[in-house]
Amino acid sequence: MKRFVILLCLVFTFFSCSKKEPVLDVIKVKPVANKTEFGFKYADYNVLNDTLKSGDTFGSILQKQNIGNKKVFEIVAQVKDSFSVRSIRNNKPYTLIRSKKKTKELLAFIYQPDARQYYVIDLRDTIAKAYKKTKPITLKRRTIGGVLKGSLSETLDTYKVEGALASRIAKIYAWSIDFFKLKRGDRFAITFTERFINDSIYDGVDSLEASFFEYKGKIIYAFPFVANAKSNRIEYYNEEGKGLKNFFLKTPIKFSRLTSRFTSNRFHPVQLRWKAHKGTDYAAPHGTPITTTASGVVEQTGYTAGNGNFVKVKHNGTYATQYLHMSRILVRRGQRVTQGQPIGLVGSTGLATGPHVCYRFWKNGIQVDPLRLKLPNGEPLTGANKDRFFKQMKPLKWELDSIANL
Protein backbone atom coordinates (compact mmCIF):
# COMPACT_ATOMS: atom_id res chain seq x y z
CA MET A 1 0.00 0.00 0.00
CA LYS A 2 2.77 2.33 0.96
CA ARG A 3 4.57 1.62 -2.34
CA PHE A 4 1.36 2.34 -4.22
CA VAL A 5 0.95 5.78 -2.62
CA ILE A 6 4.56 6.74 -3.47
CA LEU A 7 4.05 5.62 -7.07
CA LEU A 8 0.85 7.67 -7.32
CA CYS A 9 2.65 10.81 -6.07
CA LEU A 10 5.45 10.38 -8.60
CA VAL A 11 2.96 10.09 -11.47
CA PHE A 12 1.10 13.21 -10.29
CA THR A 13 4.35 15.15 -10.04
CA PHE A 14 5.40 14.10 -13.56
CA PHE A 15 2.21 15.27 -15.17
CA SER A 16 2.20 18.51 -13.15
CA CYS A 17 5.73 19.42 -14.26
CA SER A 18 5.16 18.51 -17.85
CA LYS A 19 2.14 20.78 -18.07
CA LYS A 20 3.18 23.96 -19.87
CA GLU A 21 2.44 27.39 -18.40
CA PRO A 22 0.29 29.56 -20.69
CA VAL A 23 2.31 32.18 -22.64
CA LEU A 24 0.84 35.71 -22.73
CA ASP A 25 1.41 37.85 -25.81
CA VAL A 26 2.82 41.28 -24.76
CA ILE A 27 1.47 43.98 -27.03
CA LYS A 28 3.51 47.20 -27.07
CA VAL A 29 1.16 50.14 -27.23
CA LYS A 30 2.58 53.32 -28.73
CA PRO A 31 1.68 56.33 -26.59
CA VAL A 32 -0.72 58.69 -28.32
CA ALA A 33 0.44 62.32 -28.43
CA ASN A 34 -2.08 64.41 -26.50
CA LYS A 35 -0.33 67.68 -27.24
CA THR A 36 -2.52 70.47 -28.51
CA GLU A 37 -0.88 73.64 -29.78
CA PHE A 38 -1.92 76.52 -32.03
CA GLY A 39 -5.45 75.11 -31.89
CA PHE A 40 -4.47 71.78 -33.49
CA LYS A 41 -4.47 68.38 -31.74
CA TYR A 42 -1.16 66.95 -32.90
CA ALA A 43 -2.36 63.32 -32.80
CA ASP A 44 -4.78 64.09 -35.66
CA TYR A 45 -2.13 65.49 -38.02
CA ASN A 46 1.33 65.04 -39.42
CA VAL A 47 3.27 67.85 -37.76
CA LEU A 48 6.63 69.23 -38.86
CA ASN A 49 8.52 71.82 -36.77
CA ASP A 50 11.40 73.72 -38.32
CA THR A 51 13.30 77.03 -38.25
CA LEU A 52 13.62 79.56 -41.04
CA LYS A 53 17.05 79.47 -42.63
CA SER A 54 18.86 81.85 -44.95
CA GLY A 55 17.13 81.78 -48.33
CA ASP A 56 13.83 80.47 -47.00
CA THR A 57 10.69 82.32 -48.05
CA PHE A 58 7.02 81.69 -47.50
CA GLY A 59 6.76 80.67 -51.15
CA SER A 60 9.75 78.30 -51.12
CA ILE A 61 8.47 76.50 -48.02
CA LEU A 62 5.02 75.97 -49.56
CA GLN A 63 6.51 74.81 -52.84
CA LYS A 64 8.35 72.04 -50.99
CA GLN A 65 4.89 70.88 -49.87
CA ASN A 66 3.82 70.33 -53.52
CA ILE A 67 2.04 73.67 -53.80
CA GLY A 68 2.68 75.30 -57.16
CA ASN A 69 3.64 78.90 -57.88
CA LYS A 70 0.13 79.85 -59.00
CA LYS A 71 -1.46 78.51 -55.80
CA VAL A 72 1.19 80.19 -53.64
CA PHE A 73 0.47 83.52 -55.35
CA GLU A 74 -3.29 83.05 -54.64
CA ILE A 75 -2.63 82.29 -50.96
CA VAL A 76 -0.39 85.36 -50.54
CA ALA A 77 -3.10 87.56 -52.09
CA GLN A 78 -5.84 86.06 -49.90
CA VAL A 79 -4.01 86.63 -46.58
CA LYS A 80 -2.20 89.91 -47.35
CA ASP A 81 -4.53 92.00 -45.12
CA SER A 82 -3.83 89.77 -42.10
CA PHE A 83 -0.29 88.55 -42.68
CA SER A 84 2.61 89.93 -44.69
CA VAL A 85 4.73 87.07 -46.01
CA ARG A 86 7.68 89.50 -46.17
CA SER A 87 7.65 89.82 -42.38
CA ILE A 88 9.12 86.35 -41.79
CA ARG A 89 12.71 86.39 -40.53
CA ASN A 90 15.61 83.95 -40.30
CA ASN A 91 16.00 81.84 -37.15
CA LYS A 92 12.30 82.12 -36.31
CA PRO A 93 10.38 78.86 -35.79
CA TYR A 94 7.55 77.69 -38.01
CA THR A 95 5.24 74.68 -37.96
CA LEU A 96 3.59 72.79 -40.83
CA ILE A 97 0.29 71.05 -40.10
CA ARG A 98 -0.25 68.31 -42.68
CA SER A 99 -2.83 65.58 -43.23
CA LYS A 100 -2.05 61.99 -42.25
CA LYS A 101 -2.79 60.76 -45.75
CA LYS A 102 -0.02 59.56 -48.02
CA THR A 103 -0.11 62.89 -49.84
CA LYS A 104 0.61 64.78 -46.58
CA GLU A 105 -1.46 67.71 -47.82
CA LEU A 106 -0.48 71.01 -46.17
CA LEU A 107 -3.38 72.24 -44.03
CA ALA A 108 -1.79 75.14 -42.11
CA PHE A 109 1.41 77.16 -41.87
CA ILE A 110 2.24 78.64 -38.44
CA TYR A 111 4.89 81.34 -37.97
CA GLN A 112 6.18 82.51 -34.56
CA PRO A 113 7.77 85.98 -34.60
CA ASP A 114 8.40 85.71 -30.84
CA ALA A 115 7.75 83.35 -27.93
CA ARG A 116 4.28 84.73 -27.20
CA GLN A 117 2.70 85.45 -30.58
CA TYR A 118 2.04 83.36 -33.64
CA TYR A 119 0.32 83.62 -37.03
CA VAL A 120 -1.78 80.81 -38.51
CA ILE A 121 -2.27 80.64 -42.27
CA ASP A 122 -5.17 78.19 -42.49
CA LEU A 123 -5.38 76.38 -45.85
CA ARG A 124 -8.17 73.93 -45.02
CA ASP A 125 -10.84 75.87 -46.95
CA THR A 126 -10.82 76.86 -50.60
CA ILE A 127 -9.94 80.41 -49.54
CA ALA A 128 -6.87 80.74 -47.27
CA LYS A 129 -7.30 82.65 -44.01
CA ALA A 130 -4.72 84.16 -41.69
CA TYR A 131 -5.07 85.24 -38.07
CA LYS A 132 -2.82 86.28 -35.22
CA LYS A 133 -2.95 84.68 -31.77
CA THR A 134 -1.23 85.19 -28.43
CA LYS A 135 -0.34 82.22 -26.27
CA PRO A 136 -1.91 82.24 -22.80
CA ILE A 137 0.26 83.96 -20.19
CA THR A 138 0.32 82.95 -16.52
CA LEU A 139 1.71 85.31 -13.89
CA LYS A 140 3.53 83.77 -10.95
CA ARG A 141 4.61 85.77 -7.93
CA ARG A 142 7.70 85.19 -5.82
CA THR A 143 9.95 86.90 -3.29
CA ILE A 144 13.71 86.41 -3.16
CA GLY A 145 16.12 87.82 -0.63
CA GLY A 146 19.24 87.39 1.45
CA VAL A 147 22.67 88.88 0.80
CA LEU A 148 24.32 89.93 -2.44
CA LYS A 149 26.68 87.29 -3.83
CA GLY A 150 28.41 89.71 -6.18
CA SER A 151 26.85 92.29 -8.47
CA LEU A 152 23.07 92.62 -8.67
CA SER A 153 23.03 90.85 -12.06
CA GLU A 154 25.16 87.99 -10.74
CA THR A 155 22.93 87.63 -7.69
CA LEU A 156 19.75 87.57 -9.78
CA ASP A 157 21.33 84.94 -12.00
CA THR A 158 21.76 82.61 -9.01
CA TYR A 159 17.97 82.86 -8.50
CA LYS A 160 17.40 82.23 -12.25
CA VAL A 161 15.84 85.67 -12.76
CA GLU A 162 16.32 87.46 -16.10
CA GLY A 163 19.09 90.07 -16.10
CA ALA A 164 16.71 92.75 -17.40
CA LEU A 165 15.33 93.09 -13.87
CA ALA A 166 18.70 94.53 -12.76
CA SER A 167 18.35 97.40 -15.23
CA ARG A 168 14.76 98.04 -14.15
CA ILE A 169 15.78 98.14 -10.48
CA ALA A 170 18.76 100.42 -11.23
CA LYS A 171 16.40 102.84 -12.97
CA ILE A 172 14.01 102.90 -9.99
CA TYR A 173 16.85 103.55 -7.52
CA ALA A 174 18.79 105.87 -9.85
CA TRP A 175 18.25 108.80 -7.46
CA SER A 176 19.31 107.02 -4.28
CA ILE A 177 21.70 104.12 -5.00
CA ASP A 178 24.90 103.82 -7.02
CA PHE A 179 24.77 100.07 -7.70
CA PHE A 180 28.51 99.90 -8.31
CA LYS A 181 28.95 100.74 -4.64
CA LEU A 182 26.84 97.85 -3.38
CA LYS A 183 29.03 95.32 -1.58
CA ARG A 184 29.03 91.54 -1.42
CA GLY A 185 27.09 90.68 1.76
CA ASP A 186 24.72 93.68 1.60
CA ARG A 187 21.14 92.57 2.28
CA PHE A 188 18.33 92.76 -0.25
CA ALA A 189 14.81 91.47 -0.96
CA ILE A 190 12.61 91.71 -4.06
CA THR A 191 8.99 90.75 -4.67
CA PHE A 192 8.02 90.47 -8.34
CA THR A 193 5.80 88.63 -10.81
CA GLU A 194 7.06 86.57 -13.74
CA ARG A 195 5.38 85.60 -17.01
CA PHE A 196 5.06 81.99 -18.12
CA ILE A 197 3.81 81.04 -21.59
CA ASN A 198 1.37 78.13 -21.53
CA ASP A 199 2.07 77.97 -17.78
CA SER A 200 5.52 76.46 -18.37
CA ILE A 201 7.86 78.54 -20.59
CA TYR A 202 9.63 81.35 -18.71
CA ASP A 203 9.07 84.72 -20.41
CA GLY A 204 10.74 87.16 -18.02
CA VAL A 205 9.72 89.55 -15.26
CA ASP A 206 6.33 91.24 -15.61
CA SER A 207 6.24 93.68 -12.70
CA LEU A 208 8.07 94.70 -9.54
CA GLU A 209 5.87 94.79 -6.41
CA ALA A 210 8.38 95.78 -3.75
CA SER A 211 12.09 95.76 -2.93
CA PHE A 212 14.78 96.95 -0.58
CA PHE A 213 18.57 97.18 -0.78
CA GLU A 214 21.10 97.84 1.94
CA TYR A 215 23.23 100.79 0.82
CA LYS A 216 26.00 102.25 2.97
CA GLY A 217 24.43 100.61 6.04
CA LYS A 218 20.92 101.94 5.35
CA ILE A 219 17.91 99.94 4.12
CA ILE A 220 16.24 101.70 1.16
CA TYR A 221 12.77 100.46 0.21
CA ALA A 222 10.87 100.93 -3.05
CA PHE A 223 7.10 100.43 -3.37
CA PRO A 224 5.18 101.23 -6.58
CA PHE A 225 2.10 103.41 -6.12
CA VAL A 226 -0.35 105.28 -8.35
CA ALA A 227 -1.08 108.62 -6.68
CA ASN A 228 -3.02 110.10 -9.60
CA ALA A 229 -5.77 107.78 -10.87
CA LYS A 230 -6.29 109.92 -13.99
CA SER A 231 -2.72 109.59 -15.26
CA ASN A 232 -2.35 106.02 -13.90
CA ARG A 233 1.38 106.68 -13.65
CA ILE A 234 3.42 104.50 -11.28
CA GLU A 235 5.97 106.22 -9.06
CA TYR A 236 8.13 104.62 -6.35
CA TYR A 237 8.15 105.56 -2.68
CA ASN A 238 10.01 104.45 0.45
CA GLU A 239 8.36 103.03 3.56
CA GLU A 240 7.58 106.56 4.82
CA GLY A 241 5.77 107.57 1.63
CA LYS A 242 8.61 109.77 0.35
CA GLY A 243 9.28 109.66 -3.39
CA LEU A 244 12.49 107.96 -4.54
CA LYS A 245 12.66 110.18 -7.58
CA ASN A 246 14.88 113.11 -6.67
CA PHE A 247 15.65 116.28 -8.57
CA PHE A 248 19.02 114.78 -9.67
CA LEU A 249 20.07 111.31 -10.79
CA LYS A 250 22.90 109.75 -8.84
CA THR A 251 25.19 109.37 -11.88
CA PRO A 252 25.15 110.45 -15.56
CA ILE A 253 25.93 106.90 -16.79
CA LYS A 254 24.19 103.65 -15.87
CA PHE A 255 26.50 100.97 -14.47
CA SER A 256 29.58 103.14 -14.78
CA ARG A 257 32.71 102.92 -12.64
CA LEU A 258 33.83 105.86 -10.52
CA THR A 259 37.53 106.41 -11.25
CA SER A 260 38.32 109.84 -9.82
CA ARG A 261 36.63 112.03 -7.21
CA PHE A 262 36.25 115.76 -6.75
CA THR A 263 39.42 116.94 -4.96
CA SER A 264 41.51 120.03 -4.39
CA ASN A 265 44.75 118.21 -5.24
CA ARG A 266 45.09 115.39 -7.77
CA PHE A 267 48.01 114.27 -9.96
CA HIS A 268 46.78 114.86 -13.51
CA PRO A 269 47.48 111.73 -15.63
CA VAL A 270 48.03 113.72 -18.85
CA GLN A 271 49.61 116.99 -17.63
CA LEU A 272 51.67 115.06 -15.05
CA ARG A 273 51.32 117.67 -12.31
CA TRP A 274 49.30 118.17 -9.15
CA LYS A 275 46.17 120.32 -9.53
CA ALA A 276 42.55 120.56 -8.40
CA HIS A 277 40.07 118.17 -10.00
CA LYS A 278 36.67 119.86 -9.79
CA GLY A 279 34.71 116.98 -11.26
CA THR A 280 33.81 113.32 -10.77
CA ASP A 281 35.05 110.83 -13.37
CA TYR A 282 33.02 107.80 -14.45
CA ALA A 283 34.67 105.29 -16.79
CA ALA A 284 32.53 103.43 -19.34
CA PRO A 285 32.99 101.87 -22.79
CA HIS A 286 33.37 104.20 -25.77
CA GLY A 287 29.94 105.16 -27.13
CA THR A 288 28.00 104.59 -23.88
CA PRO A 289 25.09 107.10 -23.60
CA ILE A 290 25.64 110.02 -21.19
CA THR A 291 22.37 111.29 -19.70
CA THR A 292 21.56 114.60 -18.08
CA THR A 293 21.07 114.10 -14.36
CA ALA A 294 18.20 116.62 -14.17
CA SER A 295 15.84 118.41 -16.54
CA GLY A 296 16.84 121.81 -17.84
CA VAL A 297 18.06 123.82 -20.84
CA VAL A 298 21.33 123.22 -22.70
CA GLU A 299 23.40 126.27 -21.86
CA GLN A 300 26.57 125.41 -23.79
CA THR A 301 27.95 122.82 -26.22
CA GLY A 302 31.37 122.85 -27.81
CA TYR A 303 34.97 121.75 -27.72
CA THR A 304 38.06 122.90 -25.82
CA ALA A 305 41.55 121.42 -25.67
CA GLY A 306 41.08 120.34 -22.05
CA ASN A 307 37.39 119.41 -21.93
CA GLY A 308 37.09 117.87 -25.36
CA ASN A 309 33.48 117.73 -26.56
CA PHE A 310 31.25 118.94 -23.72
CA VAL A 311 27.67 119.88 -22.83
CA LYS A 312 26.56 122.17 -20.01
CA VAL A 313 22.96 122.14 -18.77
CA LYS A 314 21.31 124.82 -16.64
CA HIS A 315 18.62 123.29 -14.40
CA ASN A 316 17.34 126.37 -12.55
CA GLY A 317 18.66 129.51 -10.87
CA THR A 318 20.69 127.38 -8.43
CA TYR A 319 22.04 124.31 -10.20
CA ALA A 320 23.95 123.52 -13.43
CA THR A 321 25.88 120.44 -14.61
CA GLN A 322 28.57 119.83 -17.24
CA TYR A 323 29.65 116.64 -19.06
CA LEU A 324 33.15 116.42 -20.61
CA HIS A 325 35.24 114.29 -23.04
CA MET A 326 32.31 113.16 -25.20
CA SER A 327 32.93 111.30 -28.45
CA ARG A 328 29.73 112.83 -29.81
CA ILE A 329 27.29 115.55 -28.74
CA LEU A 330 23.60 114.69 -29.20
CA VAL A 331 21.95 118.02 -28.28
CA ARG A 332 22.15 121.66 -29.33
CA ARG A 333 22.41 124.91 -27.42
CA GLY A 334 19.05 126.22 -26.16
CA GLN A 335 17.41 122.76 -26.33
CA ARG A 336 15.22 121.68 -23.40
CA VAL A 337 16.21 118.27 -22.03
CA THR A 338 14.52 115.95 -19.54
CA GLN A 339 16.10 114.00 -16.70
CA GLY A 340 17.69 110.80 -18.01
CA GLN A 341 17.74 111.98 -21.64
CA PRO A 342 20.92 111.03 -23.59
CA ILE A 343 22.88 114.20 -24.39
CA GLY A 344 26.13 112.67 -25.64
CA LEU A 345 28.27 109.54 -25.93
CA VAL A 346 31.29 108.54 -23.85
CA GLY A 347 34.62 109.30 -25.46
CA SER A 348 38.17 110.40 -24.66
CA THR A 349 38.37 113.78 -26.37
CA GLY A 350 40.45 116.56 -24.79
CA LEU A 351 42.84 115.74 -21.95
CA ALA A 352 41.79 112.14 -21.27
CA THR A 353 43.71 108.88 -21.03
CA GLY A 354 40.69 106.68 -21.78
CA PRO A 355 36.92 106.71 -22.37
CA HIS A 356 35.05 108.34 -19.49
CA VAL A 357 32.88 111.31 -18.60
CA CYS A 358 33.99 114.04 -16.22
CA TYR A 359 30.82 115.16 -14.44
CA ARG A 360 30.92 118.73 -13.08
CA PHE A 361 28.35 120.29 -10.78
CA TRP A 362 27.60 123.96 -9.98
CA LYS A 363 25.59 125.35 -7.09
CA ASN A 364 25.04 129.12 -7.13
CA GLY A 365 27.85 129.47 -9.67
CA ILE A 366 30.44 127.56 -7.60
CA GLN A 367 31.73 124.09 -8.55
CA VAL A 368 30.97 121.59 -5.77
CA ASP A 369 31.18 117.84 -5.11
CA PRO A 370 27.73 116.33 -5.92
CA LEU A 371 28.54 113.18 -3.91
CA ARG A 372 28.80 115.27 -0.72
CA LEU A 373 25.85 117.54 -1.49
CA LYS A 374 22.40 117.13 0.06
CA LEU A 375 20.25 117.37 -3.06
CA PRO A 376 16.51 118.16 -3.21
CA ASN A 377 14.14 115.17 -2.83
CA GLY A 378 10.88 114.25 -4.52
CA GLU A 379 7.47 115.20 -3.14
CA PRO A 380 6.10 112.99 -0.28
CA LEU A 381 2.58 111.53 -0.28
CA THR A 382 -0.06 113.35 1.77
CA GLY A 383 -3.67 112.96 2.90
CA ALA A 384 -5.79 110.15 1.48
CA ASN A 385 -3.01 109.04 -0.85
CA LYS A 386 -0.68 108.53 2.09
CA ASP A 387 -3.29 106.47 3.97
CA ARG A 388 -3.97 104.33 0.88
CA PHE A 389 -0.25 103.86 0.32
CA PHE A 390 0.40 102.64 3.88
CA LYS A 391 -2.44 100.14 3.65
CA GLN A 392 -0.95 98.74 0.44
CA MET A 393 2.68 98.91 1.58
CA LYS A 394 2.61 97.27 5.05
CA PRO A 395 2.01 93.61 4.01
CA LEU A 396 4.60 93.96 1.24
CA LYS A 397 7.19 95.34 3.65
CA TRP A 398 6.48 92.53 6.12
CA GLU A 399 7.06 89.99 3.35
CA LEU A 400 10.39 91.56 2.35
CA ASP A 401 11.60 91.83 5.94
CA SER A 402 10.62 88.22 6.67
CA ILE A 403 12.59 86.64 3.82
CA ALA A 404 15.67 88.77 4.59
CA ASN A 405 15.37 88.23 8.35
CA LEU A 406 15.36 91.93 9.19
Image: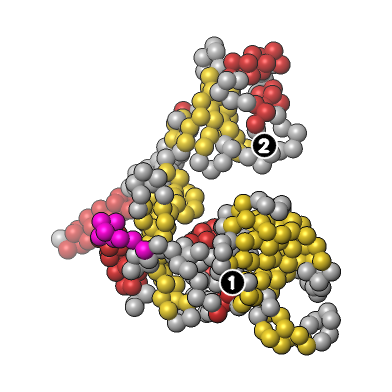
**The stretch drawn in magenta includes residue 75:** no
**Magenta part mainly helix, strand or loop?**
helix
> Can the viewer see residue 126?
yes
Q: Residues within 10 Å of mark 1 (few under 14, many from 20)?
A: few
Q: Residue at x 78, y 69 (%)?
A: 307
In this rendering, is residue 198 above or below 257? Answer: above
Q: Which residues are magenta?
A: 380-388
Quarter the C terminus occupies: bottom left
Mark 2 Cα-neighbour bin, 10 Å: few <14, some 14–19, many ≥20 = some
> What's the amino acid at mark 2?
Arg
Residue 239 at x, y = what percent? 34, 68
Q: Which residue is mark 2?
A: 89
Q: Is residue 385 magenta?
A: yes
Report whether 400 appears left or right of 43. Answer: left
The one nearer the camera, 22 or 287, is 287
Q: Which residue is mark 1?
A: 364
Near-viewer residue (228 or 72): 228
Please state the horizontal and vertical placement of residue 59, each as a whole percent of the image.
69, 24
Q: Residue at x 55, y 72 (%)?
A: 178
